Image (cartoon, rainbow, N blue to C red):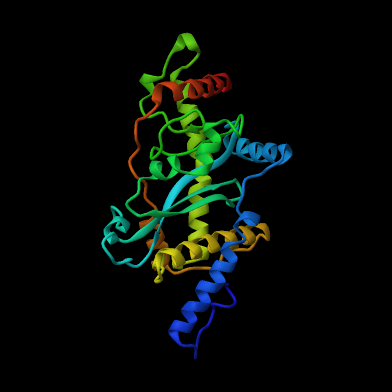
């Protein structure tokens, strides 16, 4: 895709567009091969160890977040659902990454007005975690997501969880929050590298929605291939960097299932208390 789409001098615009769509589609169908979670036990252990090495957060298999990819107005009666709260049209893309900034999972079918947690709640990875198909595994996420037994988020109000009789102290909460922030920072870095590698994700995709989705997934595939080969990042303009910042924003969180979900988080808090 990078080679084919580099230069269309002398090619009619509509022809160039068809080539981009065709190439993007053909790369996107390689998604199962290049965008996936580890399957065997040893690979899962390695992912968990890599995340643990960042800030001693255990059981983590991925960092979860959403990011907005700018698109043109799709037109029609439902166009406004693609307008996000920053007023531009976008697809809200959910990704989960590992410590090497590779994308392990991607969902690129939701409109810009969709809430991060709505996308996750309807995702296949959430279903697998819900039925305990991925046993003893958790994701780390920001406050755009609800705290669950398999999704660890920040403790916003320490006083609500401090329980000295259960071994949860203020110091443990601070250590937990610090570790979670450092651990989930990988997904923010992943989005930044991905978008710098493919500026079209921030400057805007000017094709139909279905083709935009294919392009997004195709760039994720190519991003992972680049990560596999250790490709260095090329320099980008200050304008592109500014646009990346504009498309990196989060939805406010939601407060659901807190009581049940806190059971698992309290185990983590007691664990961090033992590290003090």
Q: Where is 83 relative to 42, above or below?
A: below
Is 153 situated left or right of 84 in this image?
right
Q: Position of residue 267 (x, y in %)?
A: 53, 20
Instruction: Give the position of the N terminus as an image quadrant.
Output: bottom right
Residue name at image x 46 percent, y 67 percent: 211
Task: Give the quarter of the image for residue 143.
Answer: top left
Q: Is residue 167 above or below residue 212?
A: above
Instruction: From this view, report whether residue 136 is shown above or below residue 207.
Output: above
Report the number of numbered marks: 0
- Residue 19 x %, y %: 53, 78
The C terminus appears in which quarter of the rendering? top right
Q: Residue furthest top?
A: 165
Placement of 55 over or under 262, stated as above or below? below
Pick out the residue farthest to the front: 77
Residue 240 in the figure: left or right of residue 134? left
* Residue nearest the viewer, comparing 41 with 152: 41
């Amino acid at each position: 895709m990078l080679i084919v789409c580099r230069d269309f001098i002398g090619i009619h615009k509509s022809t160039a567009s068809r080539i981009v769509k065709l190439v993007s589609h053909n790369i996107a169908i390689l998604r199962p091969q290049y965008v996936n979670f580890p399957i065997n036990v040893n690979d899962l252990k390695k992912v968990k160890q890599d995340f643990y090495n960042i800030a001693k957060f255990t059981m983590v298999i991925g960092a979860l977040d959403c990011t907005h990819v700018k698109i043109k107005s799709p037109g029609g009666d439902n166009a406004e659902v693609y307008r996000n709260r920053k007023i531009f049209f976008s697809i809200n893309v959910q990704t989960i990454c590992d410590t090497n900034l590779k994308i392990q999972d991607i969902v690129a079918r939701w409109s810009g007005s969709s809430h991060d947690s709505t996308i996750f709640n309807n995702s296949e990875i959430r279903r697998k975690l819900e039925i305990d198909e991925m046993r003893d595994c958790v994701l780390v996420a920001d406050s755009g997501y609800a705290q669950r037994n398999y999704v660890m988020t920040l403790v916003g109000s320490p006083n609500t969880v401090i329980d000295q009789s259960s071994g949860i102290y203020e110091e443990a909460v601070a250590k937990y929050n610090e570790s979670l922030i450092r651990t989930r920072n990988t997904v923010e870095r992943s989005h930044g590298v991905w978008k710098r590698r493919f500026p079209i994700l921030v400057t805007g995709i000017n094709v139909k929605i279905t083709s935009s989705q294919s392009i997004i997934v195709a760039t994720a595939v190519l991003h992972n291939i680049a990560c596999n080969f250790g490709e260095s990042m090329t320099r980008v303009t200050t304008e592109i960097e500014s646009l990346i910042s504009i498309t990196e924003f989060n939805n406010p969180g939601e407060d659901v299932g807190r009581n049940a979900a806190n059971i698992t988080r309290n185990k983590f808090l007691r664990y961090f208390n033992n590290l003090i």
